[in-house]
């Protein structure tokens, strides 16, 4: 355990100096803040997926190429976004999310087998209707992969992103409040850490004063770090200052 704690300290060291400065610096988006912490498992903008659909019967898939859609329903009439290529970029596997499973190349992970790291109220179920998603973006790093899914929503819906992580051949669903693939960080022994965020203040979501961000290992019991985010414009969670506790 001492060795693990020392290793965690080394991984977090780079990010700590940035966050120490962040107490006097305003962030205006969570992705930039997460990236500033360092040791990110996924970097860059990711790959935006597209959603082709059949007309009748209705089937929709989020994919990075049209070929896996055509192969799955080969006699169907498809409506395909114009920018979607037939095959993914060379060296990139086909990625398919059909609402019940995530497929990357020849591997497939069912949602019903997901390891839910989110609180009970926000846990992913056995399926997600692809047409309820407005945007899906994918990242890959070695054998790990991440999907960031924005739901069709209004109001405060943009605060709740569904993140699915493939790591160590397991599929995880992360807590949704201000979730991002950029938030997932490397941890010793081929583990990862993730944030579980909660509002601060008596009115919680209705008029938050800030955010408590607790990083955990995937067992959900081992704490890694805690950050407190202060909202200088009370009630606006997208402008904030941060400090590590």
Image (tube, rainbow, N blue to C red):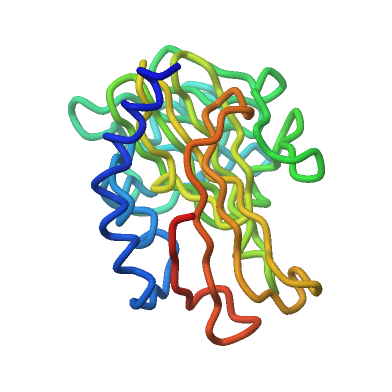
Q: Looking at this rendering, what residue extends furthest in the left direction?
A: 90
39 left or right, relative to 223: left
Residue at (41% x, 75% y) in the render? 28
214 left or right, relative to 199: left
Residue 190 visible? The answer is no
Q: Looking at this rendering, what residue extends furthest in the front direction?
A: 2
Residue 219, position as x, y percentages in the image: 60, 23
Residue 240, position as x, y percentages in the image: 48, 74
Whether 117 is drawn above or below 225: the answer is above
Residue 76, position as x, y percentages in the image: 57, 32
Residue 54 figure quarter:
top right
- Between 95 and 215, which is closer to the camera in this rendering? 215
Whether 33 is drawn above or below 88: the answer is below
Residue 24 visible? The answer is yes
Residue at (68% x, 39% y) in the render? 118
**Tag count:** 0
Q: Looking at this rendering, what residue extends furthest in the bottom direction?
A: 233
95 left or right, relative to 11: right
Residue 109, position as x, y percentages in the image: 56, 18
Residue at (74% x, 40% y) in the render? 119
Tell me the quarter of the image containing the N terminus. Answer: top left
Residue 243 figure quarter:
bottom left
- Between 106 and 194, which is closer to the camera in this rendering? 194
Whether 74 is drawn above or below 33: the answer is above
- Between 189 and 53, which is closer to the camera in this rendering? 189
Residue at (65% x, 76% y) in the render? 209
């Amino acid at each position: 355990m001492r060795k693990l704690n020392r290793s965690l300290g080394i991984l977090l060291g780079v990010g700590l100096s940035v966050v120490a400065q962040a107490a006097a610096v305003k962030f205006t988006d969570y992705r930039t803040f997460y990236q500033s912490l360092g040791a990110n498992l996924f970097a860059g903008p990711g790959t935006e997926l597209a959603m082709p659909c059949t007309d009748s019967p209705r089937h929709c898939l989020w994919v990075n190429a049209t070929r896996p859609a055509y192969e799955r329903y080969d006699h169907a009439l498809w409506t395909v976004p114009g920018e979607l290529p037939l095959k993914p970029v060379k060296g990139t596997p086909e990625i398919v999310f059909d609402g019940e499973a995530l497929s990357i190349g020849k591997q497939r992970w069912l949602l019903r087998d997901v390891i839910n790291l989110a609180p009970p109220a926000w846990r992913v179920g056995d399926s997600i209707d692809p047409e309820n998603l407005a945007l899906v973006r994918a990242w890959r790093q070695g054998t790990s992969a991440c999907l960031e899914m924005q739901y069709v929503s209004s109001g405060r819906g943009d605060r709740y992103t569904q993140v699915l992580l493939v790591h160590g051949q397991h599929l995880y669903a992360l807590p949704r409040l201000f979730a991002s693939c950029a938030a997932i960080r490397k941890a010793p022994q081929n583990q990862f850490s993730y944030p579980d965020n909660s509002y601060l203040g008596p009115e919680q979501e209705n008029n938050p004063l800030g955010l408590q961000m607790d990083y955990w290992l995937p067992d959900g019991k081992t704490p890694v770090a805690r950050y407190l985010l202060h909202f200088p414009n009370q009630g606006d969670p997208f402008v904030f200052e941060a400090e590590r506790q």
